[in-house]
Image (cartoon, rainbow, N blue to C red):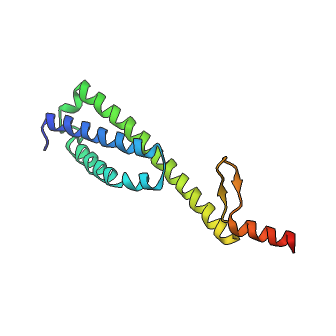
Amino acid sequence: MLSERELFDLAARVQRKVRIVAGLLSQPSLSNVLECAADLEETVSCLQRLQSDLAPGTRTISRLPAFNDEIASLRREVLRAHTLLEQALAFQTGWMRMAISGLRTGETGGYGPTGGIEAGPAVAASRVASWEG
């Protein structure tokens, strides 16, 4: 069983990890999602340790206002990271669906330099051939 100081330190460490994860997930690139995997695994492990050491009725630390504030803040950070992870996964899933759809239809275009949607080479070539043909 962890000491009170160790519990405070563990809660603070988890909160730092969750902030790192949230920072990565605020820009939902696939590399950022993959990069935060190790931090998420460590966070889950630490949260499980906190949960087991703070089982109801086993610790007086859970009655300390400062610790309760730390845990409340940690909960908010975890919920924020959870929301960002869901959004990042939805974002990546959407891009994968668009890519798969484009492969099926032969439309491999995307966004151009000005932000507009542009046809890819396969689509542009087929359109040119049909116009000339």
Q: Position of residue 59 (x, y in %)?
A: 18, 36
As drawn, the residue found furthest toward the top would be 65
- Residue sitting at 22 percent across and 26 percent down? 64
| Residue 107 in sight | no
Q: Position of residue 130 (x, y in %)?
A: 84, 72
Query: Which quarter of the figure has residue 119?
Result: bottom right
Q: Is residue 101 above or below residue 37?
A: below
* Residue 42, above or below 15: below
Residue shown at 59% from the left, 56% from the top: 94
Please state if 48 lies on the left or on the right of 117 as rendered: left
Residue at x 58% of width, y 57% of height: 95
| In the displayed structure image, the side of residue 80 where residue 102 appears, left or right | right
Q: The N terminus lies in which quarter of the figure?
A: top left
Q: Quadrant of the C terminus?
A: bottom right
Residue at x-position 65% and y-position 57%: 110
Picture coordinates of residue 115, whole percent (x, y): 66, 47
